[in-house]
Image: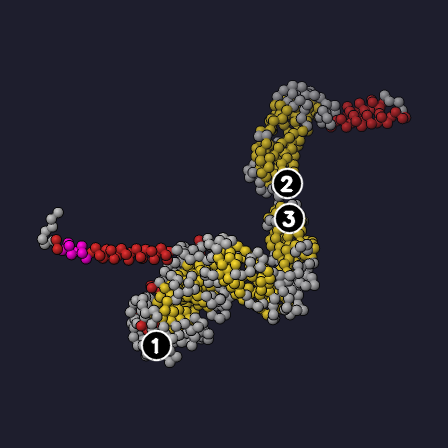
Amino acid sequence: MKLSPLVAPIIRGHIRSTVPCVIRCSRHILAFALLFIAFSIPSQTRLVLNSGNTITTLSGNGSDGRTAAGNATTTRMGTPRTVVYDATGNLFVADSRNNIVTSITPAGQLTVVAGTGREGYDGDSGAATKALLNRPTSIALKSDGTLFIADTGNHCIRSVSPDGTITTIAGNGKPGDSADGSPAKIAQLRNPSGLALDSDGTLLIADTGNHRIRRIAANGNIVAVAGTGKEGDSGDGGSATNATFRRPASLLVLNNGAILIADTDARRIRMLSPDGTISAYGNTTFRSPQGMTLDASGNIVVADAQLQQVLQTSTTANNNLAGNGKQGTLATGALNSPSSVATNANGDIAISDRRNHQVQRLALPSLDFGSIPIGQTSATQTLLLQNAADTPLLITSVTLSPAFSIASNGNCSTPPFTLAAKAQCSLQLAFTPQANGSAQTIGLVQSSSAPPSMLRLTGIGVPGTNLATSRIALVSDGSISYSGAPIKLTATVAGSLLTPPTGNVIFQDGSNNIATVQLTAGAAILSTASLTAGTHTLRAIYSGDSAYATSTSTSITQTVVAAPDFSLTTSATSYSGGANNSVSIPITLLPLNGTLNHTTTLTISGLPSGATATFTPSTFTLAGDPIAVSLMIKLPATLARNPSIPTGIFSALLLLGIFPPKRKRLPAFLLILGTLSLQGCGGFRTTSITNPADNTHRYNCTITATTTGVVGDTLTHSVPVELDLTQ
């Protein structure tokens, strides 16, 4: 095709300019895709100790809404952005959407400490709970109780004193980037979203919208410590003030004085050294690093809002602590935009699960050794090491405090050793208190390719004259049982020393003793059928011995109900018929107190000789509904007339008369007894002629139903019926 002279140069120029762009863009797209794939692979926890970390909800019921003071787990939350613990274990939460800051006690009670819930900028010099905030994103706490708030939407930093008064300490409320070296109150900030207290007590600010890190000096002036104010990702190895950042979101001060910066949109963490040099922190990758904290052993923990994970990180590797890498709820093992983390004195890590409108708590696996006399060694407890990865793992060391020790290597080797893929082994740990009072340590199991895995160990040292603690637990073989059926109660007693407990266990129903059973190999077992129908509160009390103090189990509830049974009835008590005909009797069986799922059979006794009985259905099971059975009796052509009792007596007397007196009367007497006995046995029937005129006979019959009860016993019920039959 020939192009127009006017069009051809335009098209050729467009091709020359477009094709290289397409090639270049394709390269960038491919690189980005590869990077995305790399980021999309969730890091995994390779070494799991015991049952692993557990995650529970600390605050928020999962609904987005206005927060109410009270029970933290039942209230609604907006978007919890930053979490910070104080020294006593209270957790402070910046709820950005609700424009408030809350505090949650260790007992789970929530109160509002700043903000009314309305968006605005008001209330300085008054009570913080009456002030207006605008999307508070970050908070920091001083040791004296002063609370700092990054009031992001108001482009300022506010301070709440220990007495609850709020003031603005940095930013004039207008977005901008000015006044470095001047009083912080007149400076301009732009969407500050990260705060941290430096080791000297000065406040560091992630001035996110200005791509800088700033500090409020001791004299109240604000100065830039990192960033030029321009967006970028450069400057590593040089002065931090000449570096560029992309929306730095949070800050973490390390024990050596260095400051970690979550350079969120640059997808990495950078380190500001005490000498002012900026550098990359390791070579680990992130997708949206936000909140950071130090865990109980000093490892860095990062909340990555796009990876949907909380990661324990080092300069070489990430170890996943929470989140399965998918966006979802805690019930599915997932998180939804985790944006902050904080560690308390027990090693627990709070996680702001922002878009799930909750705060979660990650707790370390733990072993508690109880109270042990000083200088004595506790009973051992098991530490299980599990390699969750598909490749072998080198265990390099296990670090414990002096009071806690490895009593034996169990089936593990002595470190360093290799744990095969998907394999596990166990160590036996013990506690030997050196001083009076509580002891706690974070045990570290170090592997070669990840940060150490942690375990919380606790125990209490008591004076040597004190008895060691014991623990007793009570279980039954079923919380619901049937009256008359035995239940099995098992009490297990564990001691905190190497020597096992001895002595007795008292089983109680309320305040009444049921029985006393001697301990055998740490257990006392009682089988009893004495509990009546109703609800019983049972507990077990260990008597103690020369080494162990007494202990009482937690009460358990045992419900005893009436065992399933049934009733048997007929439609009438008397039926009539004639020889060589049939008599039909309707029968009803009604289940009582539940179902009986065993076969039930019916029989009838007392029928005339030659009569046959047919039950329809012949066999069945008693479920929940009544069973209707039809009994059809086929009568013979001739109804045998059985002798009545007077006739039998007359016959007996006649027999007595034919025997001579004296010694021969004993056999005669026995014959009389036999004659009388035959009136109700064998082929004889208990009948009487009720109307000689029409030759009617009455037969006293019994219908019987038999089945197996729920505890294996035989259940039998009978009903009498009269048959008036005419020859």
Task: Reply yes or no: does residue 177 show up in magenta.
Answer: no
- Marks 1 and 3: which is nearer the front? 1
Crowdedness of circle 2 by 10 Å Cα count: few (<14), some, many (20+)?
few
Most extreme residue toward the top is: 637
Can you tell which quarter of the image residue 229 is in? bottom left
> Residue tagged by mark 1?
222
Does residue 595 appear to the left or right of 176 in the view shown? right
Q: Which residues are magenta?
A: 10-17
Q: Nearer the viewer, residue 710 or 86?
A: 86
> Residue tagged by mark 3?
487
Residue 167 sits above or below residue 395 on the image: below
Give x and y (percent) for residue 108.
49, 64
Q: Nearer the viewer, residue 584 or 305?
A: 305
Quadrant of image for the C terminus: top right
Q: Residue at x 63, y 38 (%)?
A: 708
CB atoms at circles 2 and 3 under 8 Å apart?
A: no
